[in-house]
Each structure stands twice: as C-alpha cells, then as structure tokens.
C-alpha cells in the first residue's frame, strides 16, 4: 500500500499539499542515477558549476511572489516578512565566492625530486535532510556548496514544508543543472533508513531533532558514511551591567519570538544582570504585548500560528508546568489564541533550571528571564544545558565578551547581536546540538575528502 505525506496548514488545519512517497526500489534507483551522474558533474569546470548553481538560486528568487504565501500556508510565517530569498542568496553567493580558494590544492612542497600536494575531492552523493522552520535557507547551506564542490545531491524535505524541495529542483533544473545531479525525493522513514544503511550516499547532512539525528547515525552505523548534524538548541542571551539596554531588549526578544520562536538559533533563555533586570523585563513585556497574532496571509499580522498544533501543545505544556512550579507568566492570553496552533507569545519570570522550559528545547514563542549577579553565575547557567549552538552576549567591553565567550560551551558566540547566520563563519554546535559544520571554508572541507599526492620525478 502506498504512503502519502500530507502538509497540514497551520492556518486552518486543512491539507495544503500531499505527495506519495517513493517505493524502496524507486528510491534506490534515484540514488543510483545520482551516483552515475556524479563523475560527469565533477568533471565540469568549477566556474561552470558555480554559474549553474547561482542561476538556480536566481530562478528560486524569481518564484518569490509564489513562495512567500506558500510558506505562510505550510508553516505559518507572516507574508509581511517576505520569505527567505535574502538569506538564501547571501549564503549561496558567499559559498560561490570562496569556492576557488576553499577547494584549491594545498601545496606541501615541490623541488627537483618530488611534488607533494593535497586535493579536495567530492564525497560523491550527498543526502540533505532539511527542516521546515527555514526550509529554503537551511537547505541551501548544504545544497549550494555540495554541488559546487562536485557532488550530486539528493534532497529530502520535511513534510511540513513539502513543496520546498520540489520548488528548488524545478528552479535548478530550469537553470541547467541536470536532473540526476540534483534530485528532490519524497521518502518514508523506513526507506530513508534503508538508503543510508545500504550505502546509497557518501555523506548525510541532517538538520532536525536530536531523535532524528540519532536515527541517522544508527542507520549509518558500520557503513563509514559521514553524518553531519544540526540538532536541538536552547540558546542563551546574557545581558551584562554595561549593555545597551534598549538594543539588548529589542534584539533578544525578537530573537526569541520571530517566526513564532521556531528558529534553530532562537533565544530560549535570557540572563540579565540584577542592575538591569527590572527595566529589561518591563521593556520586553511592552514589546511582546504589541505583537499581532493572526492569519499569516494578512499584512497586519506580526506573528502567525506555530507550524503544527503538536508543537504549540509542547510549548503550552512547558509554560503550564513552569507556572505551576512558581514561574510568573507576564503576558495575558491573546484573544486570537485558539488553544491550537495560534499561541500567545509568553515571557516567564521566576524561572529556575528545575523547570523544563529552561532545559528542554521549546522551539516556540516563549522565553524565561533570570536575574544574575556575575559573569561566573551567568556562565554556569549558560553551560547548564545539553545543547550548544549559539550564545548572545551584551556588553560594551569586547575583551570581556571574548573572555566570557571562551568559557561558554557553544558553537557560535555573538556580541551585541543574536539569531543570525554569517556564511563566512562555520555553522556548528556541540553537545546534543550535533557535530560537523556548514558554510565557510570548513563547510567545503566537510563536503569533500582530502586526497594526497606524493609524486616522485624521474630525474635521470
């Protein structure tokens, strides 16, 4: 019996899109076509691959008027924010710009006797499993550099954003990227596991839950297939006594609430020096009370529904448990809160690390704020987490921030900003956030393997 994937729109609970999953045989055949096409793709000049990828990126941009409302239907982001093409293009463009130097041979030494160098060789077939929360930007992080480096790519997108991979494949094919070089697939979990376990891919890049990442690693066990993961997060902000208070409140609260809190590097807990704590909380509450929760297709909406009712249910549960344990909910329930996907954004005070809302990933519009008295206390609390993706520090003292940053168990340290992915820096994490790294020159190194050449010259 065939299985159908259904995207349930958070706007009204209707089925927005559905696709039939591929059979096991069809899936292995698709992976086989990707493998057969890889050598020819890698043999093309680097600049040709770059040009084709960037033409595909531009073709996605040309669809933006259709993509923006489509995203609102699929995962609830308000149309007023205009989609993801800015970041999508920025990331692909940067990886295109650094490709030649990042993939260049590493010269070790040459004289009259020997020539020695290291080449960067594409893995072969790269499998990209992309999430729903920023479906275009998270996918392009790997798709663009993987293709530019000479890999072929098989893309599987989250069911919640079912049409994104289809859109990307359509655009890239129209721009001239061969169909077997970049394929979008609809797969069940079982067939996905079978493909990985069956050595259908040479590298797997997964963005999603900790459980999903563990499933990928289990499937790859014993195959020696590389697996890169970006999993959960519980990213902290720390506001020191000399911070620009207004900027800190504006940025951290936006980092906590934008996209209904459904951001990989969203701010989920905030620690504020006791001298600024009351003012910080008052300003934060004022900002959140001004949000307009509603239909994401309406221009006046600033916060749409969460992508799925079950995600909202988890956030409600964390809030309710915290309040029962003594936390204070600072925001009264919005009239638009329907008990389903439409969820009141919430600020919690009186929280402790005994509460799940300060330990477990929330991935929704809630943030707990705690008072601290020192860098030592703040650092201990920031590190008291199973996750480590980003941390946002707020101070006018750059050297102090660097010292604190050195002590934080995280993948990225921000100073006086938050919730931004710079494609020049490695996007990486530690602990249960996963391993590996995307973008930057390191992203290219992770999508290729080193191959050493030790060439002895005949001199006589």
Image (cartoon, rainbow, N blue to C red):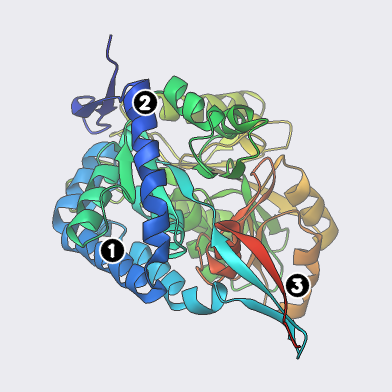
- In the shown orientation, is residue 200 left or right of residue 213? left
- In the shown orientation, is residue 411 left or right of residue 184? right
Crowding near pointer 1: few (<14 within 10 Å), some, many (20+)?
Answer: many
The answer for how far apart the CA atoms under marks 2 and 1 are is 32 Å
**Closer to the N terminus: mark 1 or mark 3?**
1
Q: Quadrant of the C terminus?
A: bottom right
Q: Please name the residue that numbered disc 3 is placed on.
A: 402
Q: Quadrant of the N terminus?
A: top left
Crowding near pointer 2: few (<14 within 10 Å), some, many (20+)?
Answer: some
| Helix, strand or loop status at disc 3 | helix
Across and down, in percent, residue 142 comes to 46, 55
Tell me, yes or no, if residue 371 can be seen here: yes
Q: Please name the residue that numbered disc 1 is placed on.
A: 57
Q: Which residue is rendered at x = 77% and y = 43% of the image?
A: 384
Across and down, in percent, residue 242 comes to 69, 74
Across and down, in percent, residue 441 comes to 58, 70
Q: Please name the residue that numbered disc 2 is placed on.
A: 309
């Amino acid at each position: 019996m065939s299985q159908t994937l259904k995207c349930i729109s958070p706007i009204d609970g209707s089925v927005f899109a559905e696709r039939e999953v591929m059979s096991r045989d069809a899936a292995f055949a698709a992976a086989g076509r990707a493998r057969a096409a890889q050598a020819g793709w890698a043999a093309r000049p680097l600049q040709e691959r770059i040009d084709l990828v960037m033409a595909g990126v531009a073709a996605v941009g040309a669809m933006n008027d259709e993509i923006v409302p489509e995203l609102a239907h699929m995962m609830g982001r308000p149309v007023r924010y205009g989609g993801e093409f800015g970041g999508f293009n920025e990331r692909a463009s940067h990886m295109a710009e650094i490709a030649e130097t990042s993939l260049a041979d590493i010269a070790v030494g040459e004289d009259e006797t020997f020539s020695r160098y290291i080449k960067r060789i594409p893995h072969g077939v790269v499998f990209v499993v992309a999430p729903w929360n920023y479906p275009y930007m998270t996918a392009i992080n790997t798709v663009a550099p993987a293709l530019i480096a000479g890999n072929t790519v098989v893309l599987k997108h989250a069911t919640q954003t079912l049409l994104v991979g289809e859109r990307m494949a359509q655009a890239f094919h129209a721009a001239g990227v061969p169909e077997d070089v970049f394929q979008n697939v609809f797969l069940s979990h079982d067939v996905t596991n079978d493909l990985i376990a069956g050595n259908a891919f040479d590298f797997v890049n997964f963005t999603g839950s900790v459980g999903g990442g563990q499933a990928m690693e289990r499937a790859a066990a014993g195959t020696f297939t590389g697996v890169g993961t970006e999993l959960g997060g519980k990213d902290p902000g720390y506001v020191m006594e000399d911070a620009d208070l207004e900027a800190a409140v504006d940025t951290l609260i936006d980092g906590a609430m934008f996209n209904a809190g459904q951001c990989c590097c969203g701010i989920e807990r905030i620690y504020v020096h006791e001298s600024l704590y009351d003012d910080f909380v008052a300003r934060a509450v004022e900002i959140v009370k001004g949000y307009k929760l509603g239909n994401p297709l309406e221009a006046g909406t600033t916060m749409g529904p969460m992508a799925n009712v079950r995600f909202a249910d988890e956030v409600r549960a964390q809030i309710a448990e915290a309040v029962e344990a003594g936390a204070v909910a600072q925001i009264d329930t919005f009239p638009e809160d329907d008990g389903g996907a439409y969820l009141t954004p919430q600020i919690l005070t009186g929280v402790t690390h005994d509460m799940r809302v300060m330990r477990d990933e929330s991935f929704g519009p809630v943030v707990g704020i705690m008072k601290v008295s020192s860098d030592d206390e703040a650092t201990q609390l920031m590190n008291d987490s199973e996750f480590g993706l980003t941390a946002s520090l707020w101070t006018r003292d750059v050297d102090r921030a660097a010292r604190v940053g050195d002590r934080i168990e995280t993948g990225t340290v921000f100073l006086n900003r938050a919730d931004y992915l710079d494609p020049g820096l490695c996007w990486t994490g530690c602990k249960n956030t996963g391993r590996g790294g995307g973008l930057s020159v390191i992203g290219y190194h992770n999508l290729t393997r080193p191959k050493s050449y030790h060439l002895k010259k005949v001199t006589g």
